[in-house]
Image (tube, rainbow, N blue to C red):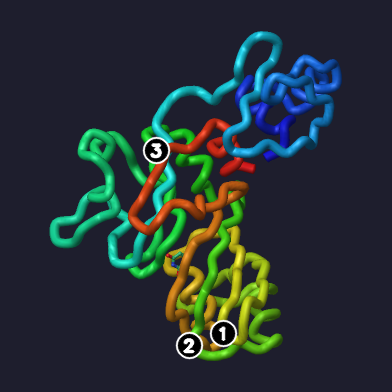
Amino acid sequence: MRLDGFVSKAAGVSRSQARTWIRRGEVRVDGQPVREAGYRLDADTRVSVGSEELSLPGGLYLMLHKPRGLLSATRDAHQQTVLSLLPDALAARVHLAGRLDKDTSGLLLLTDDGDWSHRVTAPARHCGKVYVADLADAIDDTGMSRLADGVMLRAERVPTRPARLERLGPARVRITITEGRYHQVRRMFAAVGNRVLALHRERIGGLALDPSLAPGRWRELTAVERAAVLD
Ligand code: URA
C-alpha cells in the first residue's frame, strides 16, 4: 500500500497531514527518510515518524487459506468449520470478516476487531474482491462484457455492480466484484448460461493471499497488510 495511506491510518491523521510529514522528511521507512507520498510499502516494512514506530491499534488479525469443503462459520452442529483450523485459544476469540461458500477456496480474514471487520465487509465501501473461476464451458466476449456491465441475478431486482474481468483461458476467468451477495460469482456466471466448477479468492482490497500459505494454513497480518485490506 501507499506510504501516505498507511501513515494516515496508523497515526489517525488526515492524508494531507500525513503528506506534510512525508514532505518534511519526518517519515522513515526501514530507517531511511522517504519523501514520496506514493511510495509502495511491502508487508514487512517498518515505518516511523520521528522516533515512534507506527502500528495500527492492537487486536488479532489473521489471513487463512480456506480449503474447499469447510464451512465459513464460527460454529455448526453437523459440519466442520474453518475455526477447526485454528488453535482453540484463537478460535474462541475471532469472528469472520466475510465468508466463502463451502466449495470455494482462498483468502479468508478472521479478527476480534468488530470495527475492522465491519469496514472490510460494509457494502458501501465497495471493497474489491478478486476471484479466479474455472467454468464448465468456454466463455465468449459477449458473456464477458455482460458480466462486466452487470447482470440481473435470479429473484433479484437490481443488477450487479460493474465487475472487472480478465480472461485467463477459454474457461478460466479472473473476476473482481465490489459486492458480496449470496453465492454472487456462481450466480453471475449462471446468469450468462455458464457454471462455476471451482472458485478461488485471491485478494480482498489491497491484500493478496500469501502464496506461501498452503490450503488450511493461516498467519497473522502485518500492520501494513491490515491497512491495505481497506485500500
Ligand atoms: N461468490 C460465490 O459465488 N461464492 C463465494 O464463495 C464467493 C463469492
The residue beneath circle 2 is 136
Q: Please tell me in which quadrant of the rendered image residue 10 appears.
A: top right
- Location of the N terminus (image quadrant): top right
Q: Is 37 situated left or right of 213 in this image? A: right
The residue beneath circle 3 is 111
Front residue of this view, candidates 193 and 134: 134
**Which of the two labelled residues, at mark 1 and mark 3, occupies the earlier sequence position?**
3
Q: Is 188 situated left or right of 95 in this image? A: right
Q: Residue at x 35, y 70 (%)?
A: 103
The residue beneath circle 1 is 171
Residue 11 picture location, percent across and down: 63, 20
Name the kind of residue labelled 1 in the image. Answer: Ala
Pointer 2 local density, CA inside 10 Å: few below 14, some 14–19, many at least 20: some
Q: Residue at x 47, y 41 (%)?
A: 118
Q: Residue furthest top?
A: 51
Q: Helix, strand or loop at disc 2?
A: loop
Pointer 1 local density, CA inside 10 Å: few below 14, some 14–19, many at least 20: some
Name the kind of residue labelled 3 in the image. Answer: Thr
From what the image shows, is residue 160 above or below residue 74?
below
Name the kind of residue labelled 2 in the image. Answer: Ala
From what the image shows, is residue 182 above or below residue 85?
below
Q: Please tell me in which quadrant of the rendered image residue 99 appears.
A: bottom left
Q: Residue at x 70, y 25 (%)?
A: 29
Residue 178 picture location, percent across and down: 59, 58
Pointer 3 local density, CA inside 10 Å: few below 14, some 14–19, many at least 20: many
